[in-house]
Image (cartoon, rainbow, N blue to C red):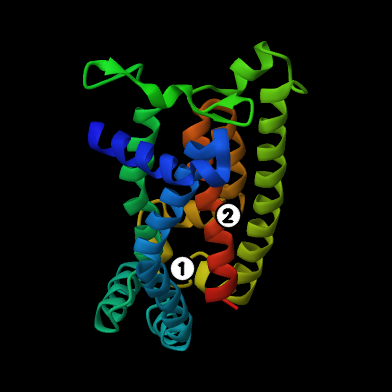
């Protein structure tokens, strides 16, 4: 973790002339963008996979008619079709899963008072008046919601709300365009335990970032806000 801390510090030093006291916050945003660039090829592959699953709908509809009275045979046939066409219903989860190590590393970094036996100097960095290691509750106790630190969170909440609404509309539009894909039994989503429930929950997932901003250290919240904003912009381009 000390290596990662040194990386953030050096990046903050490079951004200091441009961003001033908020250089570490800018470094976190830049780090998040770098992580998203690394997983972008997987996001493109996931978008192609979603289109491929939609193209399989006529064949799946035929399998449903053929095995209407035998759910087990239908399940096997759909899974075999996916395997034959090299289409995975879980491919869209990979970009999010591969980001988890970076998120947890950042969370741990800004939740630790010491690094390598020395005081964690990163905790002294701020985004305007809000410390990167602080939380929304700290801001409420230090000036209230309209204090210096509180206003930083108000701005983040507003940004997340806008991004969440855009994400909700994009997801609903995609699900409406591929109704057969997301309906029960449409593409074998129910063959994977919990997939149907996850699909119904997807339009609302961006709103969960509001909870992240409220309870996580500000540095981790910045990661989530940046990543969520990137995701929405990426989906708008890849699924246009």
Q: Secondary structure at mark 1?
A: loop
Residue at horizontal 29 percent and vertical 73 percent from the top: 79
Give residue 185's mark. 1
Q: Position of residue 13 (x, y in %)?
A: 42, 40
| In-front residue for pair 14/7 | 14
Residue 1 in sight in this render: no
Q: Position of residue 167 (x, y in %)?
A: 63, 58
| In-front residue for pair 45/18 | 18
Relative to 92, residue 224 above or below = above
Extreme-top residue of the structure? 141
Q: Residues within 10 Å of mark 1 (few under 14, many from 20)?
A: some
Residue at horizontal 42 percent and vertical 76 percent from the top: 68
Residue 71 placement, left or right of 217: left
Give residue 229's mark. 2
Q: Picture quarter containing residue 78?
A: bottom left
| In-front residue for pair 77/112 | 112
Pointer 2 with pointer 1, Cβ within 8 A: no
Q: Position of residue 52 (x, y in %)?
A: 42, 82
Q: Picture quarter containing residue 37?
A: bottom left
Residue 207 in sight in this render: yes
Q: Picture quarter containing residue 56?
A: bottom left
Relative to 135, residue 233 above or below = below
Give residue 9's mark. none
Residue at horizontal 58 percent and vertical 64 percent from the top: 233
| In-front residue for pair 51/23 | 23
Residue 116 placement, left or right of 130: left
Q: Quadrant of the C terminus?
A: bottom right
Q: Position of residue 209 (x, y in %)?
A: 57, 41
């Amino acid at each position: 973790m000390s290596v990662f801390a040194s990386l953030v510090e050096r990046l903050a030093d490079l951004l200091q002339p441009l961003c001033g006291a908020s250089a570490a916050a800018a470094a976190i945003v830049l780090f998040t963008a770098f992580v998203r660039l690394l997983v972008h090829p997987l996001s493109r592959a996931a978008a192609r996979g979603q289109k491929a699953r939609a193209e399989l709908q006529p064949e799946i509809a035929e399998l449903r008619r053929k095995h209407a009275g035998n759910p087990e045979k239908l399940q096997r046939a759909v899974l075999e079709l996916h395997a034959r066409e090299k289409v995975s219903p879980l491919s869209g989860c990979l970009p999010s899963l591969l980001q988890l190590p970076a998120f947890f590393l950042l969370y741990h970094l800004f939740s630790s008072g010491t690094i390598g036996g020395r005081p964690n100097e990163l905790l002294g960095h701020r985004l305007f008046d809000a410390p990167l290691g602080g939380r929304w509750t700290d801001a409420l106790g230090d000036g209230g919601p309209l204090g210096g630190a509180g206003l930083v969170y108000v701005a983040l909440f507003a940004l997340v709300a806008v991004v969440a609404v855009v994400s909700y509309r994009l997801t609903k539009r995609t699900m409406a365009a591929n109704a057969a894909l997301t309906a029960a039994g449409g593409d074998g989503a129910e063959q994977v335990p919990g997939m149907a429930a996850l699909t119904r929950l997807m339009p609302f997932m961006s709103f969960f970032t509001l909870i992240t901003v409220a309870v996580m250290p500000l540095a981790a919240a910045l990661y989530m806000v940046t990543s969520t904003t990137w995701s929405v912009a990426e989906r708008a381009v890849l699924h246009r």
